[in-house]
Image: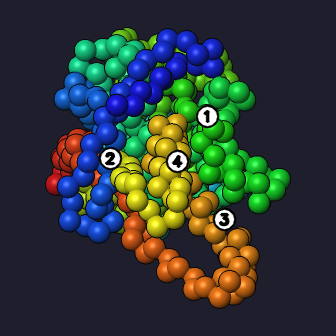
Amino acid sequence: MHQVILYRDKGYKDPVNLTYIEQSLRSPQARLVNRTTLIPQIGLEAYQCRAVVDWIDIHLELARRTQFWKLNERIERLTGRKEFPEALDLAVGNTATKYRLRVQEPDFQAVREVLKDIERQYGFVAPAHITGIEISIDFYPVTPSEEARARMHGVLVRHFYPTTQVLRSNRMWPRFTPGSIKKTDYTIGRNEGDDSLDVGDRMTPGLDRPALYGSTYYVGERDDPRAFWRIQNKGLDKQNIAAGTRDELPEDKKRIRIEVTLGRSGCQEIGLRKFIDLDTLPFTRLQKDFFQFMKPTFAIVRPGGARPGSAAVKRKIEEYRRERFLNAGVLGLQIREDAKEQLRAFEMPTIRRLHRRNRTKMPAKMRTGTGAYGTMIAYEELTRMVERALAGLQRKVRREMGV
């Protein structure tokens, strides 16, 4: 049994315990033989899970120029809401032909009527197309409580796994705001000034900073053309930081949310180019590439290694791996594995020189569990929960699109 203490904020207030039970795996796969996994003690049936489209960006190219307020008048007349279309090729008279329309919490039946109305009045040079969309999965405790939300936040940040391939720069690394030390903290220790020291920091769980459950956890970079993720304890709505206004949600509306913002290339990746593509968009497929959850596995180390002390060393390595997971999740654990490979590459010239001097052979490199998922396994219960939520969203969107 392993205990994780979750804290709300940097004052280390309102601690909540999240328990993990370690169990042996029974799998014929070579990468999973003689391994255990950690299972969070959380009753997923105690949460309702729903998927929603937060907003969608629609680009319009009109056959004749007009001012944005005229488009907004037409939108407000049909929907009762102002959406403020953004002119992209503003010219004389504050007119434009190209507009970006961001629709918040879209009702796609109403959006269809708006697009038909604009096309009738101004004509379209090309069909309306999509350049961005934000999709969220919300987890509502059946019995509302801060403790239930804290546990779900702790589980999501530890099991969410978009793979380390998305971490193409320091600005994309897993982090949370507000941090426990700085305004924004990396969950994994970093040394951006020295590459050789950075490898060591990425492997050292003692430098980790577990995400606070009152914080927002980020992976990726805002405005990335593919994807940007957030996990947050959503207790506020309609927040306007500039104006200093916000609405506090009632207890039964508070939830834990994981959201992905897809840019132009992300939309194209899922087959969402034109507005009419929403008719057939397979929302359920988003689970694999954008809402994936995994569980870690650990080697069972038995005494009797080839060299004295080898079993003790291997056990210590697995202890470090457990500590890293409990601090920074499966994504943090894979960051450690990537750093280990980088360290091996740094040291390889010295290793080869020692083998030549001692006239020994280089040991064969272990190939088991070196794929994108390493020795991780799917978190099947959470995966099914998310798939059902996305299936519900798919039905809703297709109904509103008139399919």
Residue pointed to by mark 2: 37
Q: Residue at x 47, y 49 (%)?
A: 315
> In screen coordinates, is 393 left or right of 58?
left
242 vs 369: above or below: above
| Disc 2 to disc 3, C-alpha distance | 26 Å
Which quadrant: the N terminus? Answer: top left
| Disc 4 to disc 2, C-alpha distance | 17 Å
Between 266 and 366, which is closer to the camera in this rendering? 366
Which callout, 2 or 1, points to the residue nearer the camera? 2
Going by the numbered disc 2, the residue's amino acid type is Thr
Q: Tell me which label, 4 or 2, sits earlier in the chain.
A: 2
Q: Quadrant of residue 107?
A: top left
Q: How far across and how far down the image is residue 303, in percent?
A: 40, 54
Q: Tell me which label, 1 or 4, sits earlier in the chain.
A: 1
Is the residue under label 4 in contact with that under label 1 (CB below 8 Å)?
no
Label 4: state its secondary structure.
helix
Residue pointed to by mark 4: 316
Is the residue under label 1 in contact with that under label 3 (CB below 8 Å)?
no
Going by the numbered disc 3, the residue's amino acid type is Leu
Q: Residue at x 39, y 31 (%)?
A: 2
Label 2: state its secondary structure.
strand
Residue pointed to by mark 1: 209
Q: Tell me which label, 4 or 3, sits earlier in the chain.
A: 4
Q: How far across and how far down the image is residue 130, in percent?
A: 44, 58
Q: How far across and how far down the image is residue 4, in percent?
A: 45, 27
Residue pointed to by mark 3: 343
Label 1: state its secondary structure.
loop
| Disc 2 to disc 1, C-alpha distance | 22 Å
Q: Tell me which label, 3 or 1, sits earlier in the chain.
A: 1
Is the residue under label 3 in contact with that under label 4 (CB below 8 Å)?
no
| Display colour scheme | rainbow
Which callout, 3 or 1, points to the residue nearer the camera? 3
